[in-house]
């Protein structure tokens, strides 16, 4: 869902730094406007240091918000210089943040719809926020979260999802925890199960994770005839406001167009990062 621009630029104090899994950290920052106006699927751009290496800001999905305390959280895998610098910052230090940016998930108005959320790796960051959002609007009994990772130690946020009161199913590629296989295999079987248990309820799918996973989620949803399948793309977004064109992806000119010549480069930072799966062209 495309959102009105309400972004701020602020120096945000870090009040918590926690390693939640090997090489995965959660940073909690203070900024009341971002905490109050962010929606699930949106992101912030963070300048991780005052240096010139790295020069550009780094994008992070909003992982959680607490409007009463005026705080928001980031969940990230330490995989490069930018995330390493953020991880090494201490409580009490401040970072420059621009946000919230981008589009958000649309959870609809149907009170009987079933919501299936798919999180792969650090794709759990926006899915965590989304789970909480749907619970507050439609009830946790309507939500199932499927969490996938290569191994059990890499599964993220399962305790938080359980604490929300939603149904949680886990998948690991090595079989060390939960279902053995890809989380998209778990998705296919759960959609079929949901159709049998709730034949009169619409199914809405939401996903965030590695691009191969997202492609497969889109394929499964297409095969299963799912009308609402929303994907939050992970891209490097330097400017965050659609100027640099460094985050583009191929998209249909019309959401339902199937003509190969009718496409354009969509700016993920402004047109996304949340897209209807039918909008995207997979190559």
Image: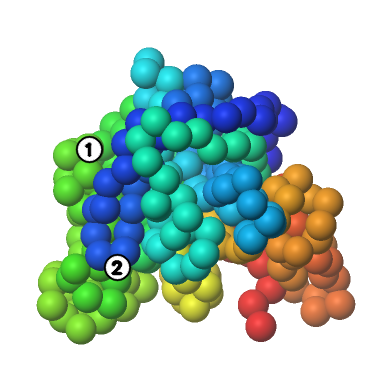
Q: Position of residue 191 (x, y in %)?
A: 33, 63
Q: Furthest residue to the front?
A: 51
The answer to whether residue 249 of the structure is visible from this angle is yes
Give the answer, above or below, for where 4 lies relative to 127.
above
* Horizontal side, residue 133 vs residue 173: left or right: right
Front residue of this view, candidates 256 and 3: 3
Mark 2 — residue?
A: 148
Front residue of this view, candidates 69 and 163: 69
Q: Residue at x 32, y 43 (%)?
A: 17
Q: Count residues near mark 2 (Cα–Cα under 10 Å), then give few for <14, some for 14-19, many for 20+.
A: many
Q: Position of residue 208 (x, y in %)?
A: 46, 59
Q: Secondary structure at mark 1?
A: helix
Q: Residue at x 17, y 48 (%)?
A: 159
Q: Earlier in the sequence, mark 2 or mark 1?
A: 2
Image quarter of residue 174:
bottom left
Labels 2 & 1 near each other (Cβ < 8 A): no
Q: Quarter of the image containing the N terminus?
A: top right
Q: Secondary structure at mark 2?
A: strand
Question: How far is disc 2 from disc 1 in space, using C-alphas?
Answer: 18 Å
Q: Residue at x 64, y 52 (%)?
A: 51
* Horizontal side, residue 8 vs residue 214: left or right: right
Q: Residue at x 22, y 44 (%)?
A: 160
Q: Position of residue 58 (x, y in %)?
A: 59, 53
Mark 1 — residue?
A: 164
């Amino acid at each position: 869902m495309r959102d009105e621009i309400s972004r701020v630029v602020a120096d945000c104090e870090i009040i918590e730094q926690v390693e939640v899994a090997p090489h995965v950290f959660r940073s909690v920052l203070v900024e009341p406007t971002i905490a109050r106006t962010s929606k699930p699927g949106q992101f912030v751009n963070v300048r991780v240091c005052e240096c010139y290496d790295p020069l550009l800001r780094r994008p992070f999905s909003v992982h959680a918000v607490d409007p009463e305390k005026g705080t928001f959280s980031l969940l990230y895998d330490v995989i490069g210089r930018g995330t390493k610098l953020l991880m090494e910052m201490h409580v009490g230090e401040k970072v420059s943040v621009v946000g919230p940016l981008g589009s958000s998930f649309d959870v609809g108005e149907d009170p009987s719809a079933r919501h299936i959320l798919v999180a792969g790796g650090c794709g759990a960051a926006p899915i965590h926020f989304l789970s909480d959002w749907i619970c507050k609007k439609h009830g946790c009994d309507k939500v199932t979260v499927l969490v996938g990772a290569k191994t059990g130690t890499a599964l993220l946020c399962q305790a938080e999802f359980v604490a929300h009161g939603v149904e949680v199913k886990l998948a690991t590629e090595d079989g060390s925890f939960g279902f053995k296989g890809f989380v998209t295999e778990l998705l296919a079987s759960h959609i079929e199960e949901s159709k049998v248990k709730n034949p009169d309820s619409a199914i809405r799918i939401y996903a965030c994770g590695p691009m191969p996973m997202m492609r497969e989620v889109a394929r499964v949803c297409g095969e299963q005839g799912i009308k609402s399948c929303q994907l939050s793309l992970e891209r490097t977004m330097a400017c965050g406001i659609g100027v640099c064109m460094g985050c583009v992806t191929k998209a249909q000119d019309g959401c339902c167009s199937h003509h190969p010549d009718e496409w354009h480069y969509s700016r993920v930072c402004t047109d996304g990062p949340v897209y209807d799966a039918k909008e995207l062209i997979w190559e």
